[in-house]
Image (spheres, rainbow, N blue to C red):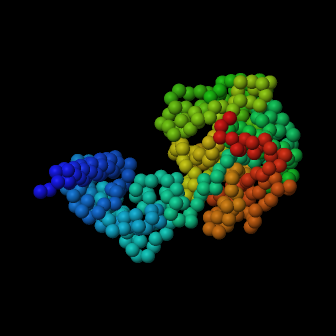
Amino acid sequence: MKNPIFVLAIVLFSFSCQNNKEISHQKHLGSMAAMAEMVAAEVKPIALSEPLTSDEAEALWKDAIYVAEKYGVEVFREPDLLKTQLFPEAIAEGKEVMIFHKPNAMEAYLDLKKTILGGNNSISEARRFGRLLGYPNHYINSLLAKNTEFKTLPDFDIKGTNVFLYYKDLASAKYFYNQTLGMEIVSDYGFAVTLRISHDAYMTLVDESKGMHRASEPKTVAIALLTDQLPEWYAYLQGKNVPIKYTYKPKENNAHDGFVAIDPEGYLLEFEMFKQHEENEWLVPQMRKYPALPTASKDVAAGLGFYGAVTWMYYQDMQEAEKFYEEIIGLRMIVDQGWVKVYQVSETGYIGLVDERRGMHTFSEDKAVNVSFLLGDVSGWFDYIQTNNSFPLRQDSLEVGPENKYKGFVGYDPAGYFLEFDQFFPHPDNDRLLELLGKKRN
């Protein structure tokens, strides 16, 4: 006679297994419904189920067809998922996936599979697969960085943004930004002065006789100083007799307001407020993370400040520029105005790509500006760029500053903008800057 306790254990075990199977089945159904809905809404061209054993796929197949029909899409049972560098090669080895799709997207998937089976399986094919899955470029970049030697700038510890501007009269420029606009001086090398705009966005004013550019070169750049105090800044600057290029004319129901001032040697400063608007749905929450940085002195622009900065650059070929900053530099687009694209670089520092046909500047070959990125590992980024020939470099080795204050290098973007990558090291001249770069918040 069997032990009653033994029999009860078998019954409970069988019930538990059955219950676990049901839970797993329902979980897969919920996941497939979510995938089908995203395909129906055209959020994703195709959507993949989790890898399934053949038995699991068979048990789910009728339900998968029902889910697809419910959302007006189709489902394909794929026993041999294509392999790209986007995912580990063994991710679906020996398993099946359900592919929810619309007809054209499935054709695109099968075309890609033919390409790969034909022997072409580079990062380009991985990006193609990522786009089929509806992934944005920054997410594709992160997957490639996990599974290949591919890297982008964010993999080398971005500490902040900086922009170098060039002057005949450095003393007057320094006075304007420090004493008129109230920005804190965080380092002063004599021939170059760095000031803090916001939490981790900076600008450096350079004596043209010691810099890479001349002040006479076209100033094909504008700096947006982000603030929600436009009327106050406008009245203050008028009181200081600062030249105004475009006056303050606020409008209702538009994405942003602002006005444009001119600095002592002609650089354009756009005092700008991004408002709650569909264009800014990702930007506004990011800007709220850090309060406006007040001016460095209570006697200068009292109560005013900035919570971020955008460096505007001007292009003839926007598509080429977007691809470069998304796929090579690895930045995330945070605002899309059609003819203007804004990318987040650091917590409060941004770059903006502008179609020169509609911007404040037109394209020029020469530009009196270096767009700079402050890094925690500039040597690693330099070695990566040099090894992979990712973009043209101005030099074949890192520049080491006097007394080892910094290391850096310069390359070129598709429109010829100088991109400078810098890392600063302990030195009395860098104490305040390094203190700020090490902080998470004010």
**Can residue 281 be seen by looking at this rendering?**
yes
Picture coordinates of residue 18 (x, y %)?
A: 22, 52
Picture coordinates of residue 290 (x, y %)?
A: 62, 35
| Location of residue 52 (image quadrant) | bottom left
Left or right: 128 in relation to 22? right
**Can residue 67 be seen by looking at this rendering?**
no
Left or right: 114 in relation to 356? left
Q: Who's the residue at 65% across and 50% down the image? A: 158
Left or right: 78 in relation to 254? left
In front of the other: 37 or 106: 37
Picture coordinates of residue 247 (x, y %)?
A: 67, 30
Does residue 85 lie above or below 341 as drawn? Answer: below
Q: Who's the residue at 70% across and 57% down the image? A: 378
Quadrant location, the C terminus: top right
Picture coordinates of residue 333 (x, y %)?
A: 54, 47
Does residue 277 lie above or below 415 as drawn? Answer: above
Quadrant location, the N terminus: bottom left
Q: Who's the residue at 78% across and 36% down the image? A: 184
Q: How many marks?
A: 0
